[in-house]
Image (cartoon, rainbow, N blue to C red):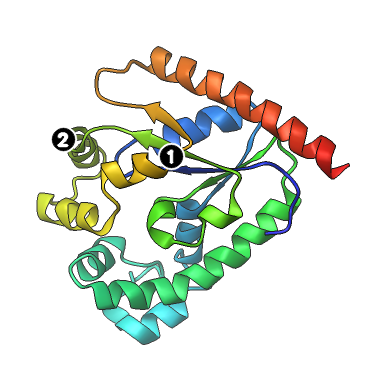
Amino acid sequence: MQTSKFKLGLTGGIGSGKTQVANLLAGWGASVIDTDLIAHSLTAPAGLAIDPIRQAFGAEVIEPSGALNRARMRELVFADPTRRAELEAILHPLIGQTVRQEAELAQGLYLVFVVPLLVESGRWRQQIDRLCVVDCDQATQIQRVQARSGIELATIYNILAAQATREQRLAVADDVVDNSKAVSMAALEKQVLVLHQGWCNLALLASNRAS
């Protein structure tokens, strides 16, 4: 990624609250590029990933609407690492292409790449200037995921097992947002605003160096 803009990587485990934090940053003027949203677009009806997925996994993972059956695919790939690797081989190049296109067009104060598996991927760290982890305990993650999507507990545990541990993420973080159960929305906003102001300063320095 050749852009000279300041680049923040935002990550966290499932249910940690990455989207909440990303929405705050977008509201304050950052350009947010969410790889999950890109993946959803690629697997919507007529999405670029649909035909390759149908060929690799069969028609049973495609809804009558032409969209990916996410629940069925989730069951498949989080129970079988080989199948997960197959799906990633289809999606990741397409996601990467879209990310680069959006980054080049972005006009915000700085770039925020929301990447659920940023730590696990092994290739994102070299493409960003700073890494922020949205953190909470596993019990809170599970509670939030069940409340918002009703995913079966066994599937949630499979997803958690496929992700980096809380300790692994925190060990490589430059910045941490505490989004545990006890943290109010007001307290979350205050934390993120302080970090945002720091990232804006770094973005200004990066811009001055580039010019």
Q: Is residue 69 left or right of residue 146?
A: right
Distance in Å between CA atoms under marks 2 and 1? 21 Å
Tell which residue pokes out farthest to the right in this image.
211
What residue lies at 73% left-to-right and 44% top-to-bottom? 5
> Which circle, 2 or 1, is nearer the viewer?
1
Which residue is nearer to you in this view: 103 or 1?
A: 1
Q: Quadrant of residue 127?
A: bottom right
Identify the image quadrant of the N terminus. Answer: bottom right
Q: How many marks?
A: 2
Amino acid type shown at disc 2: Ala
Which residue is nearer to you in this view: 191 or 60?
A: 191
| Location of mark 2 (residue) | 139
Please tell me how crowded label 1 is: few (under 14), some (14-19), or many (20+) other residues with Cα within 10 Å. some
SS of the residue under disc 1: loop
Q: Quadrant of residue 135?
A: top left
Check the image and report above or below for 22 versus 181: below
| Location of mark 1 (residue) | 173
Check the image and report above or below for 149 versus 178: below
Q: Are the residues tagged 2 and 1 within 8 Å (C-beta)?
A: no
What residue lies at 34% left-to-right and 71% top-to-bottom? 64
| Residue 202 at x, y percent in the picture | 68, 32
What residue lies at 10% left-to-right and 55% top-to-bottom? 154
Identify the image quadrant of the C terminus. Answer: top right
